[in-house]
Image: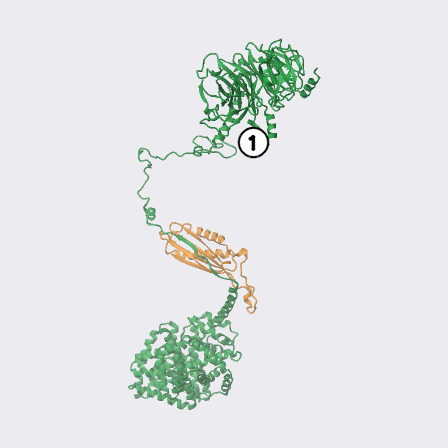
Chain colours: A orange, B green
Amino acid sequence: MSVTASFSAVDGLPDTEKNPGESENTYILRPIFQQRFRPSVVKDCIHAVLKQELANAEYSPEEMPQLTKRLSENIKDKLKEMGFDRYKMVVQVVIGEQRGEGVFMAARCFWDADTDNCTHDIFMNDSLFCVVAAFGCFYY
Amino acid sequence: MEPGKRRTKDDTWKADDLRKYLWAAQSAGPKEDKKHREKQPQKDLETDLPECREHRRRDPERDARCRDRAAEREKPHRLQDQDQDRHRDRRKDTRSRDREKPKEGHREQATAEKAPSRGKEREKGGHRARRDGLRQAAGCHNLLGWDAQGQPPDRPERRTQAVSKARPEEREPKGEEPEGGDEERERRYRERKLRYGDSRDSPLKYWLYQEEGERPHRWQEERKRREKSHARERRDKSAKDSSHSLSDRGGEERRRDRRLTEGFPSEDERLRGHADRKDRPWREEQWRRVAKNGEHRSRGAGSKKDETGSQHAENSGRNNGRDKDSRRKHGREEGALEWKLARRRGSEEAVEIGKEDADSENAGAGEHTAGFEDDFEDYEDDFEVCDGDEDSGLDALESAEMAEELPPARRREIEEIRKAIHAENERVGELSLKLLESPGQVERGRGAGPGANNSPSQTPVCGILVDFATASHRQKSRTQALKQKMRSTKLLRLIDLDFSFTFSLLDLPPVNEYDMYIRSFGKKNTKQAYVQCNEDHVERDVQTEEVETREVWTQHPGESAAVSGGSDRGSPGGAAVVPKVDTPRLCSFLRAACQVIAVLLEEDRVAAEPSWPPRAQDCTLPLSDGSVPFNTGLLFLQNRRVTCVHASQAQRRIVVSVHGLPGKASAPLLDSRHLLCVWDIWQPSGPQKVLLCESEVTCCCFSPCKAFLLFAGTAHGSVLVWDLREDARIHCSLKLSGCSWTFRTSTFSTDGVLTSVNHRSPLRAIEPVSASVCKRQSCVLSPFSAPEETSGLSFHIASLDESGVLNVWVVVELPRADLAGSISDLGLIPGGRIKLLHSTAVHLGGSLFHKGDEFWVSTQTLNVKFLPSDPDRFVVGTDMGLVCHGTRQERRVFPRLFRPQQQGVRPVRVNVVDFSPFGEPVFLAGCSDGSLRLHQLTAELPRLQWDHSTGGRAINGLHWSLTRPAMFLVWDDASCIYVWDLLESDLGPVAKQSVSPDRLVAMTVVGEAEKTRGSFLALVLARASGSVDVQYLRREWATPAGDERRRLRLLLQEAP
């Protein structure tokens, strides 16, 4: 099983950072409604990528690290293109071989539930399973 | 610990080695070692070799040094110098032996630190032990200085920690920010402490060194200035004490940084550094005295006197381990105190003391009798561990300064040293540049600051450059981090973070063993041969049962036969659902429905089968439009003569026919019985009900409101009641000619019961007392009576026998049928609910006729009719040609008698009396002499009388038309039917029809004035042959004219 996580920071600091001397800062605490992290859209995106990349993939221990890396980068880039402004994207890709063993994966986040969100998608075929979890954390 | 420590030492040697080298010009033995060491740091940097190798190399050197020392005493110094020259010249040709002399101080300084461990080692007498001691001492210094000095340039992360603290200071020049200045001062103090406090010799060395150079007055001034901020300084110091090692490290770092930024040109800073060095010990002492506890102070005091003792104590404490850190520090402070004392005594004295100290140690060691120089060299060796680059750099500069006052030869020496240092630093700097390109770039980017002119070539040591670059980077990131932190604290107030629930990303249950086996091996070597379900049909391939299918079409434009639910075949749904049946309701519904359906079928058949009643067609009378014969051809009706027909007043289409005894026996059970048949004229195919009667029925009538009760009077004088609603099961049933017929016996019979009031003569008439009047009366009398009573059963029956007795009976319906029969209600059939109670008996013989009537005795009453308008009154026809008028209460009414126009009493039977059904107060009376009279109720004499309308034939029947008020029908015993229409002709019948050859024996009139279907009037004719047929009269007689009643009244009034 190989795990690769890609991080990407979209955009940096807000304008208010420029003058820290000001007492009143106008922080942007919520994403624009259209730009908020929408799990369904992200899931579709992930699903499309997985279907394309893993259409007839076979598990081979040598290739999987590169594959996970490529997948995570690919998905991360796709997500960045989708314009989730001020979101930090974390994409985690896990590929494991299907040998009949039981697998249980879970995630838990310490976040601001109003802005942050996550989604995941699973791809399976006879030889491997692939779990992609994408987390979007909002930059205030 | 090992590599770091080694490196630290090596780094420190870099600069000091030069000094050592110079100093060792006099004592050649150690110099050789130093030269080797000089190269080592470079090697370290270049190759990054592990220090152990270097260390290994050093050990033999040391051994050699010891041996040299021993040899040194015998050999002249010059000889040793020459030996060393070989090595020295190999590296640096420019250096001369002369220069070594002034560097003695430096050498001293460098060696000073080694002294304690050396002393101990000597006591042990083992080189290994000595090395351990060294290591330990170095370890102690390491705490303070190794990080900054020994850290290779490729490990900036450790350094940045210190740089971040040093940063503000670095930025701000000392004077501008007092805080930064204080820090710097404090740092300098600590750093000096580090350098000198560890070894007792170092203060001596220091002061030796210091006294050599002339102190400018500026230093003094600066010192004064700085003393103003003593208090703050101390405060800072105490604060920093807690994080001793860290801040010390930071201090070391800062020192480097400052030197880097300010560079060599900043003489002032350097001078100030020296001043600080001088000031610190004193200040520190003062502060210590105030702040620290007595123990330390006393210890410090003790150490003043006996340097060696305190030194040893200190050393032992240091050797004990790191946990003695604080104590060590105090020791160092004590060392600082010593510096001050030493200064007071004078440099010479201090040197003396140091030498004495060394002597005593050497003496303690016994076999080693190394000279002062040797000792000093060793000390220097140790000292340089913590002395660091600053000493090399600063000392080099200071030495240059000193050189101004020194003789030219010495100045030249210093010049040489400086050159060498520069050369060295250049090399190192280049190297470090290579290693740390990006920090160098950062530094250059920051070129506007004081360090702008610091080219890499000018950077004295690689460590310095690295520190600066990373420090600037660090500074930036630190400010950034500060901002971020502030921002985050502000933001965290606005938002709240929480734990999300646990997302289950994947839950893949393990495949159990069997599934796995089946998946991989399950399909191997198997094929499907055949399927068998039943054990006993092995010969068949597939034995599953046929699937039940059903085609259903639900779409609108229907196709094929499956439309609307498909074929009924094989629909199992109906059988499964058992509907809840309300049995009585279903029965009543079926009964009614059957009747309706039967009527409809009958009508259809009549219409469709013109050939069926051929006789009926023949029988159609000229005065009728059509005729329908009743099916009297039934087995039980054959050969029976009809004696009477009667129609219900309420339901005009219900007709009852009374059949006499059969002429010849056909059905043994029925042969002795008289039969009554209830017909519906719309269903002529068979009687609705068949009633059995023991005796001959002379008269009959229906219940007035609804025709469900049939009353009959018999020749035996009994009154019978049939309840037509009764269930057929309580009556006997016979299967005749393929059909099952129910023969009902009478529900109640007065025969044999009620003998006291019963008739003793044959009954002549039986009449219902008019229901409408009854209803009116009951409404008046008992407004609370039940509707059922008023609607159906609250009426009386009057029966008249020949002897003139008129009995009135009350019809009572029992609330509950008793199938077991009743003891009290005799005459009631078991299960029957209707019975008669005798109400009144009117003896017409006494009331109607008076004594004056001589013929009265033999007078027969033939019939009775109740007035439709007043059921209390009735008229009775007699055989004397008279019609009597009476009431049930035997009141006197006028006229008492209705007489014919002929005077006198004649034996003429008044056969028929009939009231007009339209409420006209007139009645017709037909007599046996053929006379016909129309009486008004108010007059004794008839209004009209026709004597010869029938040609003298006796009138057997007379009926008012039910549809036309002015019309009536008469038939005589010659089977001739006369149709009278008073409006057309009041002189004679408008039509006359003789019924032949089948003689007419009975006739009744049925008809309804219905608007919807059109009124009809029909004659039910009973023939002598036993057949009964219905003659529908022609439409002109059935359909009433518009103002017929008015014209009839006019006629009656106008009549004479």
Res B370 seen here: no
Q: Is residue B93 left or right of residue B556?
A: left
- Picture quadrant of residue B769: top right
The tally of labels here is 1
Res B864 seen here: yes
Q: Residues within 10 Å of mark 1 (few under 14, many from 20)?
A: few
Q: What amino acid is found at the position of numbered circle 1 in the picture?
A: Ala
Judged from this view, the residue extending furthest toward the front is B851
Chain identifier of the residue bearing label 1 in the image: B
Q: Label 1's element?
A: loop
Residue B826 percent location from the top left of the image: 48, 24
Quadrant in the picture for the C terminus of chain B: top right
Q: Foreground: A23 or B684?
A: B684
Residue A57 percent location from the top left of the image: 40, 51
Q: Can you say whether B595 is above or below A83 in the image? A: above
Residue annotated with mark 1 = B786
Q: Foreground: A11 or B502?
A: B502
Q: Can you say whether B173 is above or below B939 in the image? A: below
Q: Can you say whether B784 is above or below B828 in the image? A: below
Residue B900 percent location from the top left of the image: 65, 13
Quadrant in the picture for the N terminus of chain B: bottom left
Q: Is residue B289 left or right of residue A85?
A: left
- Picture quadrant of residue A133: bottom left
Residue B981 percent location from the top left of the image: 65, 15
